[in-house]
Image: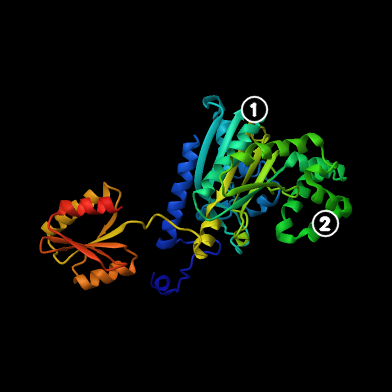
Amino acid sequence: MEGTMNKKLNLNPPSGFPELTHDVASHFIDAMQRILKVFNSHGFTPFITPLVERLEVLTAKSDGEITTQLFGLVQLQDEKQRARLGLRFDHTVPLVRHVVAHYRELRFPFRRSAIGPVFRGERPKGGRYRQFTQADIDTLERGDANLWHDAEIMLVIAKALATLNIGSFTFRVNDRQFLSSALRAMGIAETQLSYACRVIDRIHKRGTKWVSEELGKLGVADVTWQRFLSEGVQSNIADETSALQVQKLVSLIQPLMPAQASVIIDPSLARGLDYYTGMVFEVTFDAYPQLGSVAGGGRYDSLIADLGGPRDIKGVGASIGLTRLLLRAVEAELYSSNSQTGKVALLSDQHNADTFAVLANIADLLRKNDVIIEQYLQPNPLSTQLRWADRNGFEWVIIHHNNSWVIRSLKTQEQLSFSKMEEVVTYLTNLF
């Protein structure tokens, strides 16, 4: 035991697993609440799935890059056991697993939201993490794929991002059927389509030259690929029906988007997950390209059937990468949180049971009026308490002294005196 106690431990969190200190965490909670409020207002009700899934479920439609990034889970007492469980890499697969198991009990269309950590064994750099929080919405429907559900998903994500007040952002939209039809026309074999899409998905990481070289190995002439990129939906390379589908979606949602959002068609957008079958999109903030893609999603019409469910259940969903977005935005001082607004410290130069009860009562009265208040409990001088309040970012302090009350602004140092506790409550309630 002594040897273990003397061993110097590495107390840093593992690489790629972020630790949010209280100042960042308050922004994080604030953003989650704003986003969930938008999700709930559109009927996407919360649904919580386990962090852990069976590997056979996680790999059922993930034969691409994701498979190499899965974290397996084993018990330490049985390390030699082959991992049969893994940490979820998104919220969609666990949702679909539940729907396949319980579709007879569900009412369709089935809308749900989820927010929580997911795990991928990526190289942690440039805003990429191994553990990160996604805010996710999905709609499961029965029958033919519904363009209106595609539009709704994109509009809700746009409204959620708009509530963060970081600035204008752009939706890049494409359709996997449109892209696949173009790749087939360029000579890509059916068995190579998934790989080709994963190659194209890296265009912003590896560059257009690398993508052209990789597609060339699959038989795609560079001049044809470049023409497709420049002409997009106007190109006669791809299937006309799928091209019209993309255009129809964009024309539908563009006038309904919040003022901060714009929409463009990007023929190179693929998204790497193999389960996408139709519309796909990604979102970037216009003034902050260094944040990278902060949200994305698409249609997955065969995933339910691939996991053993009915073929007539189709899905569409999207997620906001909250960890990447918020950590970078807070670091760059782009995000303004409401979590500190009206934060009040309650101080006193008396430290006894009667005073504690009086202060606790006034604190509860203020909390009922949505004032964030923290009571200082250490028997220290008022000067020490005031330094503590200032260093911890309090905007206002209430000072209890000789059965009277003082409200002081720590920004301006202006203060008002009151003789009754009720007057303090009224003043602060009106202030906030």
> Which mark, by number, is residue 310?
1
Residue holding disc 2: 212
- Residue at 66 percent of width and 38 percent of height: 299
- How much space separates mark 2 and mark 1, taking CA atoms? 39 Å
Q: Is residue 86 visible?
A: no
- Closest to the camera, between mark 2 and mark 1, is 2
Q: Specify the quadrant of the image occupied by residue 153.
A: top right
Q: Specify the quadrant of the image occupied by residue 387.
A: bottom left
Relative to 63, residue 310 above or below: above
Total marks drawn?
Answer: 2
Q: Nearer the viewer, residue 121 or 421?
A: 421
- Where is residue 286? Give x, y as percent: 62, 56
Q: Secondary structure at mark 2?
A: helix
- Where is residue 353? Give x, y as percent: 12, 58
- Where is residue 189? Give x, y as percent: 85, 43
Q: How is the image coloured?
A: rainbow
Q: Nearer the viewer, residue 190 or 200?
A: 200
Q: Is residue 359 visible?
A: yes
Question: As shown in the figure, which amino acid type bears the numbered disc 2?
Answer: Ser
Relative to 38, residue 375 above or below: below
Disc with the residue nearer the chain's start (2 vs 1): 2
Question: As shown in the figure, which amino acid type bears the numbered disc 1?
Answer: Pro
